[in-house]
Amino acid sequence: MMVLAIDIGGTKLAAGIVDAGGDILARDEVPTLATEGPGRVLERIVRLAKALLATPGVAADTIHRIGIGCAGPVDRHAGLVLNPPNLPGWVRVSLVEYLEKALGRPAVLENDANAAALGEFRYGAGRGARSLVYLTVSTGIGGGIILDGKIWHGLQDGAGEVGHMTLVPDGPVCGCGNRGCLEALASGPSIARRAREALGTGRPSRLREIRDITAADVVRLAQEGDAVAALVWNETVGYLGLGVAAVITILAPERVVIGGGVARAGDPLFEPLRREVRRRVTLVAVESVPILPAALGRDVGILGAAAVALEAEPI
Ligand SMILES: [Zn+2]
């Protein structure tokens, strides 16, 4: 069985033809150009998909289903995209109906974080496990929960928003309206903001030489011994540790997988994070819960959407 997988993000649109084993037989991506609004973006998605279906060697008539991972929130039952912050103008857009009509196949919609969680579970760092919690730490902090092999959607598909657990009661305002969320403390932009704030104390730091500080600058200078960068990075690991420890204490998943740009820091993130989590989790056998970097890299969007299509009920 092969599926057409479509990944719709605020920056890029990616699509692929994927077989049940997770091999990507054809793929392509184009910029979303989200500011042009839903009409133009939908046309671009259809052009991208049709070009893939016409790839020489791909038997388009054997592709019976489309899997879509889209920046959330989405209403997957109604097939609607519900005004995601990264897709301006997408107010209750009937994505599934539009793509089914344009591409002549049934489509299944899932939010991108849940799709990525299922992709890692099926093809990446979660292979062989029965349960997994996935976090993506980049511009925001998203998450997906897989329990007994299935996405846990929760009431009105609200589950998995690990980025919006409160860690600091009167902390910085979050995009969701709450204060002190994990996302408002440890997302890429939040790390950069805390670094700028730390410079306000007047302590010397090479961060001052950088015009637009990023999370990558903070982790690099922390590794090079810059005291202010190290302070900000250690706090970041501390916040992420609180979040991951809470998730493990509640769900006792077999694995925790962390993706997104901030996770590309590698060992300077994962080694202290594992120590912090072990220190905080007392009632779950935490030494048996690997905390792993995501394994699918840039393919996570396509493989996540493919996994959603392949897991869907038989047509
Ligand atoms: Zn929040």
Image: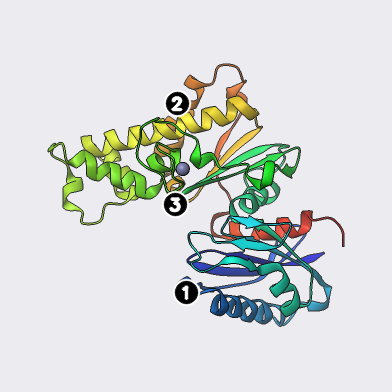
Q: Position of residue 153 (x, y in %)?
A: 69, 44
Near mark 2 (Cα within 10 A), the count class, few <14, some 14-19 or many ≥20, is some
Question: Could you tell me how far apart the alpha carbons at marks 1 and 3 are, in whole angstroms?
Answer: 21 Å
Q: Position of residue 24 (x, y in %)?
A: 67, 65
Q: Nearer the viewer, residue 123 or 167?
A: 167
- In the displayed structure, 249 sits above or below 143; it is above
Q: Nearer the viewer, mark 2 or mark 1?
A: 1
Marked residue nearer the N-terminal end (1 or 3): 1
Q: Nearer the viewer, mark 1 or mark 3?
A: 1
Q: Amino acid at mark 2?
A: Glu
Q: Quadrant of residue 191?
A: top left
Residue beneath the point at 54% across and 28% down: 246
Near mark 1 (Cα within 10 A), the count class, few <14, some 14-19 or many ≥20, is some
Q: Nearer the viewer, residue 90 or 271?
A: 90
Identify the element where label 2 is drawn. Answer: helix
Residue 59 seen in render: no
Q: Which residue in the structure is indicated by mark 2?
A: 276
Identify the element where label 1 is drawn. Answer: loop
Residue beneath the point at 16% across and 52% down: 209
Q: Position of residue 232 (x, y in %)?
A: 29, 37
Marked residue nearer the N-terminal end (2 or 1): 1
Image quadrant in which the C terminus is located = bottom right
Q: Position of residue 297 (x, y in %)?
A: 54, 55
Q: Amino acid at mark 3?
A: Gly
Tag shown at residue 33: 1
Q: Which residue in the structure is indicated by mark 3?
A: 261
Q: Amino acid at mark 1?
A: Leu
Dots 3 and 2: beta carbons under 8 Å?
Answer: no
Residue beneath the point at 78% across and 53% down: 311
Q: Under 8 Å from ligand 1: the CB of mark 1?
A: no
